[in-house]
Amino acid sequence: MADFVDAGTLVLMLSLGTMAFGGVVLVAGNAGDLATRFWSAGFLMGGGGVLLLLLRGQILSVVSIQVGNTIMLGGVACMLCALAVYTQRPRMLRVVALWFLGSVVLFNVAASPPILAPLHARVLIIAGVVSLSQLLAVIILSAVQFQTTRLLNVLRFSHAALGVAFAARFLFILQTHTASDYLGPYPFIGSSIPNGLFFMAAIFIAFVQGPTFMMLKKEQADKEAFEARKQLADEVASRWAERRLQAARLDDARAGTIEHFARGVAHDANNIIGVLQLGYGQIIDQVKRRQKVGAEALKRMETALDQARITTSGLMALSGKEPPPLADVCIETVVDEVASMLESTLPTNIRLELATEPGLLAYTHRGFLISALFNLASNARDAMPRGGVLRLTTQHRDRLPEGAVRIGTPLSGSVVDIAITDQGAGIEPEALGRLFRPMFTTKEHHDGHGYGLYMVQGVVDRTGAALVVETALGQGTTMHFLIREIKRG
């Protein structure tokens, strides 16, 4: 009787301890982790099954030996599944399922009529299948490649030791191969010393396995968290470096834009200054010689000053944010002024033609309008290197003209159309979409800086005007500058 009490006490400690550990892990562990859920379920089921076997025939008479052992084997299977999930070996789940089904069928067939195997045979089966399960655990853990730590080695050793303990019990029972009468209903065979040693080893190893696996999971979680933090830090550093690189590129682009723009303005300014210096030199020379100041030099200087005023107006159209003051402007006088300035810049192979409708008034900014028209006319002039006719026409319109490109305000009602037409080669289709972008030019690098039409767009946007581009390859281009018309009272 003392032997029974001693063995029962050890088994009770084993069952209650494993159930308590499984319950704690189930409640406090990571519920979203499949391996943790399997591990906690395994300890709960294993301890519960052993407890049912312990109480069978004493309190729970309705529980059979088949039910207790099936639950206990299910708990072992759950622990093996936890190891398979942890080691990322999904194929081993099938092997565990086959082991569980084979073990349960083998034991239940042996323990049920008509076979009803003797007690030592049933204990042999349980010892053999549990020993085999620990061998599976060692096989599963042996393939871990993503980490090698002392905890992992401890877990491997504990499963190997538990497998050896059950294998030793299997051999011991096989050797004795007889049931002892003093054990009564409790299914343990042999003297008290082997039983005590076996159950003490099983309790110790089970109590080592439980926390070791959870510590291993925590170690893995800590490592993943560290890797995640490191990756996040690397991403932050990379993004910061990318931002700095982008900022540097933006600064370079801004510097390049300013340099390009300054080069273009300096080019225009040098041309104007050169003309003024030439005229001024002629006037000084004539004054020194006490000659009459020639009108040609004065006219040349006046033209240069007009171009300077146009350039300044274009820069103001680009730089200002507030809308400029608009007023009623006589279109005919504006076109005459632009034509007068333009004639001095035209080569001998280009003829300027004017067709103006008298009496047209528009609501706009006179200086900005002159700047825009002069830029458009200068582009038309440069589009005819072989010569031709450059035509400026003005007319009243009730409908906007059709064209390939439209920018500015969608006007309606009566408008004034100032059209500038050249007989050049037309504009390529791929250039139409970039026509008004800054720094875009189809001219040679030294002939254009790509801000003329960009300034025109600035004038269009700030004065509430519109611009329509009509072009065809080989047939020239017409730029329609459209302004709201003011009817005379």
Image (cartoon, helix red, strand yellow):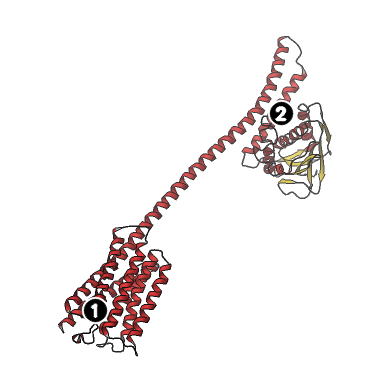
**Along the line of sight, the residue nearer the viewer: 135 or 378:** 135
| Image location (x, y in percent) of residue 83 | 36, 67
Give the residue displayed 76% in from the left and 50% down from the top.
Answer: 412
Q: Which residue is mark 1?
A: 173
| Image location (x, y in percent) of residue 160 | 29, 67
Q: Amino acid type of disc 1?
A: Ile
Q: Is residue 155 left or right of residue 379?
A: left
Give the class, few, some or many, for how many residues have Cα within 10 Å of label 2's Cα (few <14, many ≥20): some
Whole-Å distance between the Cαs marked 2 and 1?
118 Å
What numbered label is drawn on residue 306?
2
Quadrant where the image shows the C terminus:
top right
**What residue occupies the far front of the structure in this picture?**
175
**Along the line of sight, the residue nearer the viewer: 412 or 173:** 173
Determine whether the residue tagged by mark 1 lies in a helix, strand or loop.
helix
**Along the line of sight, the residue nearer the viewer: 367 or 194:** 194
Image quadrant in which you'd find residue 47: bottom left
Image quadrant in which you'd find residue 74: bottom left
Quadrant where the image shows the N terminus:
bottom left
Q: Is residue 345 left or right of residue 23?
A: right
| Image location (x, y in percent) of residue 2 | 15, 82
